[in-house]
Image (cartoon, grey):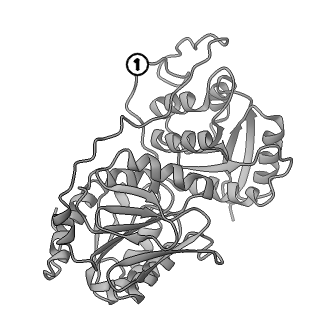
Amino acid sequence: MSTPKKIRVLIVDDSAVVRKLASEALAADPEIEVVGTAIDPYMARDKLKELSPDVLTLDLEMPRMDGLTFLRLLMERRPMPVVVMSSLTQRGSEYALEALRLGAIDFLGKPSGSYSFGNLGPQLAAKVKTAALARVRPLAPSTDAPIAHAATTPTAPAPTQAIRYVPGLRPAVAKTRIDPARLRQLDPRAIILLGASTGGTEALRDVLTNLPGDLPGIAIVQHIPATFSKAFADRLNGLCQLEVREAVDGERLTPGLALIAPGNFHMMLQWSGDGYRVRVVDGPPVWHQRPAVDLLFKSAADCGAGPHAIAGLLTGMGKDGAEGLKKLRDKGATTFAQDEASCVVYGMPKAAWECGAAQIQVSLDRIAPYIVGRSEATVHHAPVSAFSG
């Protein structure tokens, strides 16, 4: 019987302490082999060619060439699964979100001044194993000098040259003013519910930036650490016609507003007589996740949202959300799952499809039009019909 192939990992970090701790944490997992470490992108470039790792862990703040610049060049020239490690700061959050836009599969916040990973070790190992299964898509080439894994070997920038890639998706959009009368015409019970995990930050960006600002309220659970959820919501708010915020306990979910569950807290819904309010609560993880999609979906079904809801599961590892989506469908909701071809990780949507929770699978580029079309039908209480491309 052959021994299962281990996941080969290269660790890139300028901190000797982090390299040692990450190496020890990953080596403790029998499915992972740390094949090497690098102190900066220039050394990483050479070790990528020498060692051919399956997954790269990448610090984002390094001397000589910063991690974002290296990641962009890597995803243009040698796309591969990358898990980024970022400091637990506002700037670190923004850098991590930009890394996901550039193609990183996942990220992990690393504590500063700590000589122990604590429970971050198993988290890093889990993210590496998920990344190894992920679908990686290359970036469109830029005009910058490539790293040394293209067909030819170009000259690298001089070692003394500091290269900085400034985070930012694009300039903030000007929100179109929505007629308040139009929003008041929407059924207050109409609601849109979305859940996502690995690959979800970019999937949600693609969906939300293509939605108009006059939709029913949207409640979102994205598996994301506490220090990153507000930065994620703020970034989306600058890109969307919808207003996007990190949810606050007791806040009313109104038309034109999208609320994102805060990291490390569950988010649930209550019907208050004239609209939905969100409850942001502590509690044990569900499916190893907090926030958990299942708690949001099940609470929506329990407070009568079913016939008025559009709910969907986007890319992500595991099964979180499938049970809640099935409960919503049984209560009359319109339900969907992202299709396999457009997922970074086809886990949660697969679970939803296989258990009969999702009525249909939709490609990422069609989810926004699907939501808009079904919203019109749901708001006006029209019967649910099958979606056609």
Q: Name the residue type under label 1.
A: Thr
Q: Nearer the viewer, residue 76 or 100?
A: 100
- Residue 267 is situated, as x and y percent measured from the top left of the image, at 51, 73
Residue at left offset 46%, top offset 69%: 348
Q: Nearer the viewer, residue 294 or 276?
A: 276
Residue at left offset 54%, top offset 41%: 94
Give the residue furthest to the right: 115
- Residue 60 is situated, as x and y percent measured from the top left of the image, at 63, 35
Q: Compared with residue 353, is residue 241 higher up or lower down, i.e. above or below?
A: above
- Residue 239 is situated, as x and y percent measured from the top left of the image, at 35, 45
Residue at left offset 46%, top offset 76%: 296
Q: Compared with residue 301, is residue 256 higher up or lower down, i.e. above or below?
A: above
- Residue 224 is situated, as x and y percent measured from the top left of the image, at 56, 58
- Does 233 sit left or right of 96 as displayed? left
- Does 22 sit left or right of 137 as displayed? right
Q: Secondary structure at mark 1?
A: loop
Q: Using the rendered image of the protein, determine whether residue 374 is visible from the camera's viewpoint.
A: no
